Image (cartoon, rainbow, N blue to C red):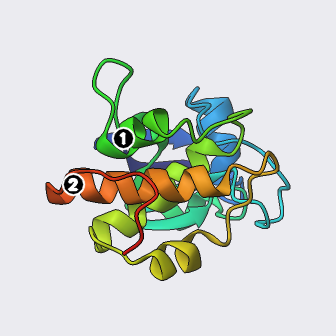
Amino acid sequence: MSIMLNLNGSERQVDADPSTPLLYVLRNDLALNGAKYGCGLGQCGACTVQLDGKAVFSCLTPLAAVAGRQVRTIEGLGTIERPSPLQQAFEIEQAAQCGYCIAGMIMRAQALLDRNPTPTDAEIRRHMQTNLCRCGTHMRILRAIRRASDMISGKPAVAGASK
């Protein structure tokens, strides 16, 4: 079956079974490998992408559910030459260790910053709690999100500062 979706701002047609998880379509059919297969159960967040601006687990989202909707992956956020403020903040704070979870972390954090550019620490923690980092870089990830919030709102970034 042929399904149309808006992927990172471009219309894309995918020929696949409508029950196929979006993660498989992104990685296998569209060669977008940013979202990772982690647990396959929606419990780790490595596969997180945005669907109409909300963070979703692409391993649990069937292709049929994204027809005609906007899907945003880490590949649609920035480039190596022109990273987004959030990607820059993750790099500055060295928030990635093995890097496996980072695309999902960034996509979930971006959904928060798009909705609320100046979240409190409590809002950041609550929003990010569904994504896991096995390397234990959670504090660096939180600092990166705070830094990106400061960058977006034009405030001078102070790493580790609480709101």
User: Can residue 53 be seen in this snapshot?
Assistant: no
Label 2 sits on a secondary structure element that is helix
Q: Residue at x 35, y 42 (%)?
A: 8
Q: Residues within 10 Å of mark 1 (few under 14, many from 20)?
A: some
Q: Which residue is under mark 1? A: 77
Q: Kindly indicate the quadrant of the structure image that contains residue 48.
A: bottom right
Q: Kindly indicate the quadrant of the structure image that contains residue 79.
A: top left
The type of residue carrying mark 1 is Leu
Mark with earlier residue (2, 1): 1
| Total tally of numbered discs in the picture | 2
Q: Residue at x 79, y 45 (%)?
A: 135
The answer to which of 37 and 63 lies nearer the viewer is 37
Say which mark, if any, is on residue 155: none
Say which mark, if any, is on residue 152: 2
Which residue in the rendered view is the most extreme toward the top?
Answer: 81
| Horizontal relation, residue 134 to residue 124: left or right | right
Q: Estimate the x, y position of residue 52 in percent, counting from the top left.
A: 37, 66
Locate the C terminus by quadrant: bottom left
Q: Estimate the x, y position of residue 151 in percent, counting from the top left.
A: 24, 50
Q: Residues within 10 Å of mark 2 (few under 14, many from 20)?
A: some
The type of residue carrying mark 2 is Ile
User: Can residue 78 be seen in this snapshot?
Assistant: yes
Q: Is residue 122 above or below residue 53?
A: below
Alpha-carbon distance for marks 2 and 1? 14 Å
Q: Residue at x 83, y 64 (%)?
A: 41
Q: Kindly indicate the quadrant of the structure image that contains residue 37.
A: top right
